[in-house]
Amino acid sequence: MPVKISVRPNGPYLIEGECEVVDPTGKKVETGGKPTIALCRCGGSSNKPFCDGTHNKIGFKAS
Ligand code: FES
């Protein structure tokens, strides 16, 4: 099944399907085996690369 990446209005990227996230050094980032993960798009998350909901608090706006 192909990976699906959706852009949430004023929010994160939703990644559905099996994927691997790596940091800038190539080290694997643990995703907890969740079927869907949310990656921060606003830059404000305290849990990068994942979304922690901060986009709502800082009023991030992007279609
Ligand atoms: S997109 Fe949600 S915290 Fe950045």
Image: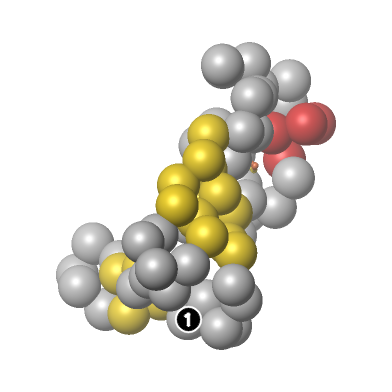
Q: Which residue lies furthest to the front in this view?
A: 1
Residue 7 visible in rendering: yes
- The residue drawn where x is 56% and y is 49% is 14
Q: Observer-nearest residue: 43 or 33?
A: 33
Q: Name the residue under label 1.
A: 30
Q: For the residue carrying disc 1, how many other residues have a C-alpha within 10 Å: few (<14), some (14-19), or many (20+)?
A: few
SS category of the residue bearing label 1: loop
| Above or below, comparing residue 3 to residue 33 in the picture | above
Residue 40 visible in rendering: no
- The residue drawn where x is 73% and y is 26% is 58
- Residue 18 position, x and y percent, is 43, 73
- The residue drawn where x is 32% and y is 79% is 28
- Residue 19 position, x and y percent, is 38, 70
- Residue 53 position, x and y percent, is 74, 45
- Hey, which quadrant is residue 35 in on the image? bottom right
Q: Observer-nearest residue: 25 or 39?
A: 39
- Quadrant location, the C terminus: top right
Q: In this view, does 28 lie to the left or right of 43?
A: left
Residue type, mark 1 in image: Glu
| Above or below, comparing residue 43 to residue 29 in the picture | above
- Quadrant location, the N terminus: bottom left
| Above or below, comparing residue 10 to residue 25 in the picture | above
- Hey, which quadrant is residue 32 in on the image? bottom right
Ligand 1 found in image quarter? top right
